[in-house]
Image: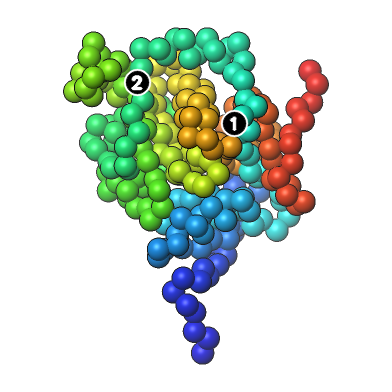
Amino acid sequence: MTAHHPQTPQFFLTSPSVCPYLPGQLERKVFTHLVGTRAGELLDLLTQGGFRRSQNIAYRPACERCRACISVRILVDEFRPTQSMRRVMRNNRDLIGRMDSASASSEQYSLFRRYLDTRHAQGGMSEMSVLDYSMMIEDSQVDTQLIQYRRRGPDSAFSRSSDGALVGVALTDVMADGLSMVYSFYEPAEIDRSLGTYMIVDHVERARALGLPYVYLGYWVEGSEKMGYKIRFQPQEHLRPAGWERYMPPEA
């Protein structure tokens, strides 16, 4: 019988299931558990190889006949927001984002449910209970932070007790070389704010302030409408078989 050291990761392969991004495709994932005192170091290493985190599991696609899922990271030092992104930031000047250790609340879950019911009612997360949500937020052995975006109150510069309504939440891993946006959601009634764009640009600025070179956005799938927004944040690198390569957008 082979003995495994408790700090040595073991990898497993899922059974085929319906691909959520491309019609007619099946997906498989390879995954391992993030446990022990070196979970953060392991996540840093695996993220370099295209893995993502969900609770205490790190996973990446391992489909037999498809390589459509491409890991994407923004080059923080070179990033400059486009004119439309600058407009989004101006339109959200009345918001304040506070980063704290990841802890779930009923207020967050209510916003999460409104977001899912409006934008992803048929998605795989649509049946998540409040307990499922709490596990998604809190079940982590790495440096996971929760950024809550609220309307700025008259005294928000001095006390968070003055902060207003919650309009957005971002679950974020702080790694050695960047910020990884694990999951984010926002108030669906505030569609004119473009809160998804706002939170990504805000993460770039936070990474810049921390001296971190990358913001990891997860997977981009060419031709997938739900993934298309990620390609707008340039410059960025894509993980290819030879390693991370600068992405050159096609000329318009």
Looking at this view, is 184 or 157 the one in front?
157
Q: Is residue 128 visible?
A: no
Residue 250, picture quadrant:
top right
Q: Secondary structure at mark 2?
A: strand
Measuring from the top left, give residue 128's x and y in whole percent: 35, 44
Q: Is residue 137 left or right of residue 203?
A: left
The mark nearer the N terminus, 1 or 2, is: 1
Q: Is residue 250 visible?
A: yes
Say few, some or many: other residues with alpha carbon within 10 Å of mark 1 (under 14 / 14 to 19 / 20 or more): many
Q: Residue at x 79, y 18 (%)?
A: 252
Q: Is residue 25 left or right of residue 160?
A: right
Residue 228, picture quadrant:
top right
Q: Residue at x 39, y 16 (%)?
A: 190
Q: Residue at x 70, y 58 (%)?
A: 64
Q: Secondary structure at mark 1?
A: helix
Q: For the residue marked with disc 1, what is the amino acid? A: Val
Image marks 1 and 2: residues in contact by CB distance under 8 Å: no
Residue identifier under label 1: 76
Residue identifier under label 2: 96
Looking at this view, is 65 or 142 the one in front?
142
Say few, some or many: other residues with alpha carbon within 10 Å of mark 2 (under 14 / 14 to 19 / 20 or more): many
Residue 102's place in the image compared with 203, above or below, is below
Spatial separation of the CA atoms under disc 1 and disc 2: 21 Å
Q: Residue at x 40, y 48 (%)?
A: 143
Q: For the residue marked with disc 2, what is the amino acid? A: Ile
Measuring from the top left, give residue 232's x and y in whole percent: 64, 24
Residue 174's place in the image compared with 88, above or below, is below
Res. 189 mark: none
